[in-house]
Image (tube, coloured by chain):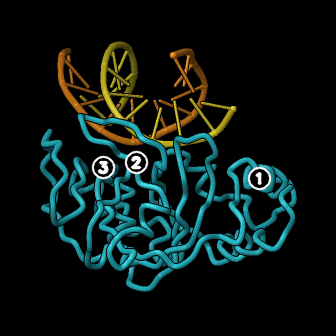
Chain colours: A cyan, B orange, C yellow
Amino acid sequence: MPRPRKRLAGAAGSDKGPAGKRTKAKSIGEASAKVENASPQKIAASENDEKSLSSYWLMKSEPESRIEKGVDVKFSIEDLKAQPRQTACWDGVRNYQARNFLRAMRLEEKAFFYHSNCKEPGIAGLMKVDVQFVRMMKRFIPLAELKTYHQAHKASGGPLKSMALFTRQRLSIQPLTQEEFDFVLSLEEKEPS
DNA sequence: GCCAACGTTGGC
DNA sequence: GCCAACGTTGGC
């Protein structure tokens, strides 16, 4: 799971981790997003497909305390707000596809802050790649509500019909299409369903 | 806390 | 390169 770090950071898209060799080193590096695994072939392949031209993202983080290897991984949107410059370093991403998306990000692109593995999962706010707090959602958008739209849109061909949150369930950094992003934003203005 | 989904590892 | 075993994610 992604683990934003509690300190200032540079561009999320700028880090160049050493490619390749698998290591069991579990310590999270100070300076860069350490991602275990991924053969060079796999990296090359997936950097070309996927939606690497996306300008919109969804990034998951756990807002409730959970100890993993002796470290509390909790990092909520409130924690992000509390950082110096409201900016964090998003490391702890291990999955290579998620890592590739991190590398594809460009400064100033917009990203939803998603609360995962918690009592109420859903989209809590907006960030820009840096990774900096922008604002809270006008209202919290629960996963359950998004799922309802996803199901309906699969039938109707609506904007959330293939949202990665549901089609790529375990991906912690995911691209959104413009349509998906706009639709989620439009939900802010609606009554909770 | 349970466990389904799914990503990763490693023997063959 | 297959695939069973294993580990992790994350909803519920």
Residue occupied by mark 2: A74
A156 to B7, vertically: above or below: below
Q: CA distance from mark 3 to mark 2?
A: 17 Å
- The residue depicted at 78 percent of the width and 68 percent of the height is A187
Residue A153 position within the rendered picture, expressed as x and y whole percent measured from the top left: 81, 58
Q: Chain of mark 2?
A: A
* Whole-percent x, y for residue A126 in the image: 55, 73
Tell me whether circle 3 and circle 2 mark residues in contact (CB < 8 Å). no
* Residue A11 rendering spot, x and y as whole percentages: 29, 78
Q: Amino acid at mark 1?
A: Glu
Identify the chain of the residue marked 1, using the numbered disc in the image. Answer: A
From the viewer's perspective, is A59 left or right of A125?
A: left
Residue topped by disc 1 = A145
Q: Residues within 10 Å of mark 1 (few under 14, many from 20)?
A: few
Residue under pointer 3? A94
Q: Residues within 10 Å of mark 2 (few under 14, many from 20)?
A: some
Q: Are marks 1 and 2 on the same chain?
A: yes
The first of marks 3 and 2 along the sequence is 2
